[in-house]
Amino acid sequence: MQDGKINLRSLLPEELAAVLKDMGQPAFRAKQLFEWASRGAESWEEMTNIPKQLRAQLAEKFSLGAPAALRKQVSAGDGTVKYLWRLRDGNAVETVVMRYHYGNSVCISTQVGCRQGCAFCASTIGGLVRSLEPGEMLEEVMFSEKESGLKIGHIVLMGIGEPLDNFDNVVKFLRLVNHPQGMNIGMRHISLSTCGLTERFEELARLNLQLTLSVSLHAPDDETRSRLMPANRGRGVAQLMDACEAYFRRTGRRISFEYAMIDGVNDSPEQAALLARHARRVSAHVNLIPLNHVDERSFAPTPPERISAFRKALEREGVNVTVRRSLGGDIDASCGQLRKKTADALRAGTERE
C-alpha cells in the first residue's frame, strides 16, 4: 500500500466484486476492472468502458500506474534484458527477461533487498528493505513484457529476495498471474526458488499449486552450507532433505536443486557424492550454476573442466543434472548488482553536490 491507497493490481476479481458491491456497482464491473489491470492499463482514463464518475471514486481508493525503468541493459551476446524498476515509494528492484528455445522467461524479485545473508550473493548486501506487494510482482512481469515486446511464457521467482519470506504476498501474486482472466500463465511454467525456509514447505505443499520448487542448496553438508547460507543454521541439511521429501510425496512435483559452483568450496568429488545421495532421495533434478562474479565477494567460479567432471560424477550416480547456460554476463548478471551499483552512484552524486 502506497500513500494510503491499495494497488489495484493486487486484487483478485472476487475482491474487486466485493468493493464494487459496497459502492453499489453491478458485478460485471469487477471483470472489466480486472481485465484492464491485467492488460497493463497505466491510467484510469484508459478504462473507456468504466463510467467517469466511478473511475474518479476508484482513484481515491486505489493506485494505478507503472514502475519506471531506471535502467535497462541488453546483452550483446544473447539478448537477455535486465531492468531496474523504480517502485512508487522510490525503492528499486531488478527483473531479467531471458530467451530460451522453449520461449521467453522472466526472473522477478519478491523483496527489496534480502535478509538471508548468503555469502556469495549481491542481493543481500544492505539487508532487507521491505517485501513486495502482489501487484508489484505482477507489474514486474507485465511491464517487462510490455517494454521488451517479448511475450512471457515462463516465470522464475529467483531475483532479489526470498519468496517464502514474503509467503502470503507471493501466493497471491501466483493466483493473480495464473488467473484465466488475467495474464493466464500456467503454474507448471512457474518456478519458485527458496534458500530453504523449511517451516513454509508444508504450507506450500498444501496449496498444491503445481509449480516447480527450486531449492538453492549450494552445498550438501552442514559445515559448508552454513558458511555460505546463514539460513541453514538452526535448520540443517538433514531437516531440509526431510522437508523436500515430504513436499515431493505430497505434491508429486519433482524438486530442483540449484547449485552454484564455487571454486574450492563446494566442488569436491566427496561433495558430488553426497549431493547425489540427497538428489536420489527426493528424485531431484540438479541444476549446476557457474558462479557469477560479485565485486564485494571473494568467491571465484569453478573452472569449466571441473564443472564438467562434477556433472559426470552426478550422472554416474543416476542423477538428472544440467549445467545452466550463462546468460547476460555482460550486463551485471548476478541479482542485486545493478540495484546496488545504481544506488551507490546516486549516493556518490548526492555527496558531491
Image (cartoon, rainbow, N blue to C red):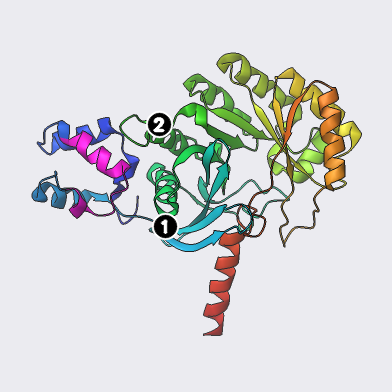
Left or right side of 206 for 43? left
Q: Nearer the viewer, residue 240 or 12?
A: 12
Question: Magenta span covers which residues?
Answer: 29-47
Q: Earlier in the sequence, mark 2 or mark 1?
A: 1
**Where in the figure is residue 226, as x and y percent of width and height?**
77, 40
Magenta stretch: dominant secondary structure: helix
Q: Secondary structure at mark 1?
A: loop
Residue 322's spot in the image, x, y percent?
A: 72, 33
Q: Position of residue 57 (x, y in %)?
A: 14, 49
Q: CA distance from mark 2 to mark 1?
A: 23 Å
Residue drawn 51% across and 45% down?
Answer: 110
Amino acid type at image mark 2: Asn
Q: Is residue 204 above or below residue 2?
A: above
Residue of label 1: 87
Tell me if residue 77 can be seen.
Answer: yes
Asked if the stretch drawn in magenta spans residue 48, the answer is: no
Q: Is residue 350 left or right of residue 291?
A: left
Which residue is disc 2 drawn over?
A: 178
The spot of residue 304 in percent (x, y) is 83, 46
Residue situated in front as seen by the camera: 168 or 192: 192
Name the quadrant containing residue 31: top left
> Can you see residue 266?
no
Label 1 amino acid?
Leu
Question: Which image quadrant is residue 280 in?
Answer: top right
Badge nearest the viewer, 2 or 1: 2
- Identify the residue at image location x=62%, y=14%: 249
The residue under the point 38% across, 44% down is 135
